[in-house]
Image: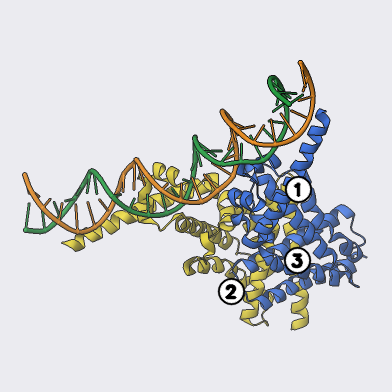
Chain colours: A yellow, B blue, C orange, D green
Amino acid sequence: MSETRTEAGAQRRLKLRERLLEVARQSVAERGLAGLKARDLAAEAGCALGAIYTAFDDLDELTLRVNLSTLERLGQSLDAALNQASPSDALLALAHAYLDFARREEPSWRALFEHRLSGGARVPDWYADARNQLFGRLEAPLARLLPHRDPPSRARLARTLFSAVHGVVALGLEEKLEATPPEALDAQLETLVRLIAAGLAQEAARGV
Amino acid sequence: MSETRTEAGAQRRLKLRERLLEVARQSVAERGLAGLKARDLAAEAGCALGAIYTAFDDLDELTLRVNLSTLERLGQSLDAALNQASPSDALLALAHAYLDFARREEPSWRALFEHRLSGGARVPDWYADARNQLFGRLEAPLARLLPHRDPPSRARLARTLFSAVHGVVALGLEEKLEATPPEALDAQLETLVRLIAAGLAQEAARGV
DNA sequence: CTCCGAATTGAACGACGTTCACGAGATTTA
DNA sequence: TAAATCTCGTGAACGTCGTTCAATTCGGAG
């Protein structure tokens, strides 16, 4: 029966995919994107070099899968920060959760932004969707803070705030020992979110 | 005379450095960091492959020099936006100037943040200094807006605001066609800076 | 047991950054 | 002027990378 054979083959391929993904995740978590080498991967996963290309199109696809799982962990960390009484506290908690995650898993987190598709290809939809879901976590607190704005406008605002927080974290962690001591970075982030929350509260007061 | 020899040699080396830098700048501006190949560089500069390494330690140093000149052009663009009546207009103009520059010279601008020193080495001081001078351009408007804050605190705030604006621009340009149409990005940036400026004005009003 | 199709293998390929023994060309010395 | 010396650009060669594909192995069907 050729069906049985194909099925068994597909299952084996899935096993290999999982094994490679697990090894790749570990590698990126420990050594960053630059440490993800095809030969090391094959050795650690106990397969031949060429076998990688039976499970993935290329290392780009594997990297995107690794980044997807990082996005999922990041999403969970953000969710854990959402149980806050006031919406501005929630925004603050989200920002700190983002910074915490970036510190805790710095190489994996960096990989999210360092990776560039070869040939300037566009990222596949399943990845772009997962990326965009991150911004969505800001919408609930924003809805409580700005009930009179329409949802699309809030979605844009969510994206903007997320980007701003990301910028502070990214540039803050970039040059660790040089200009921004760790505790100062927390303070910077808090400053930014408080400023924005104050501006939003003001707008909300006017808007009602 | 060995001095004459050495001097002539040094001058030739400088000429080569300049020629390579010019070609590298063009290459990064057109094809981005990924398009900077040693062999192409040598061909375009009309020298041998190995000659690159008589003018620079390695491609990392050359890249840093290219990025330095990008930082200088960026700085000039920001300076041109500083002639604004009110400090909050100045902050807004700086943010738009940053976005404009990133759009106008996107590959060069991206190179500023994509480049990673091999072996995880720290960036040299002359480069870190130039980088930090960027933040300084925010301090004049901030001083007018918050005259009662002490300068170090304003410097930290300048860094934070710059980082926030950078985050919005960076994530906004990342996925061009996907989620953020160009005009929306301008609006997002304006929203952010207005929110922050409103928060700062509020603080200033309380603070005096 | 033999056969056959599919899956796995790893040597080979081309491109990359970097190095270094060589030789050309200029300068000093006899 | 000829020989000796030194300097510096040269490009073939090296090690490493991602990727490919002819050869091989393997497992189930007859």
- Residue A108 visible from this viewpoint: yes
Label 1 and label 2 in one chain: yes
Q: Is residue C8 left or right of residue A175?
A: left
Label 1 marks a residue whose chain is B
Name the secondary structure under disc 1. helix
Vertical placement of residue D8 versus A75, above or below = above
The amino acid type found where label 1 is placed reads Tyr
Vertical placement of residue A102 versus A131, above or below = above
Q: Which residue is mark 2?
A: B179
N-terminal of the pair, mark 1 or mark 2, is 1
Q: In the image, which is nearer the foreground, mark 3 or mark 2?
A: 3
- Depth check, front residue: B92 or A86: B92
Q: Which residue is mark 3?
A: B98
N-terminal of the pair, mark 3 or mark 1, is 3
All told, the count of numbered labels is: 3
Marks 1 and 2 sit apart, C-alpha to C-alpha, by 34 Å
Q: Which residue is mark 1?
A: B127
Which quadrant of the view contains residue B91? bottom right
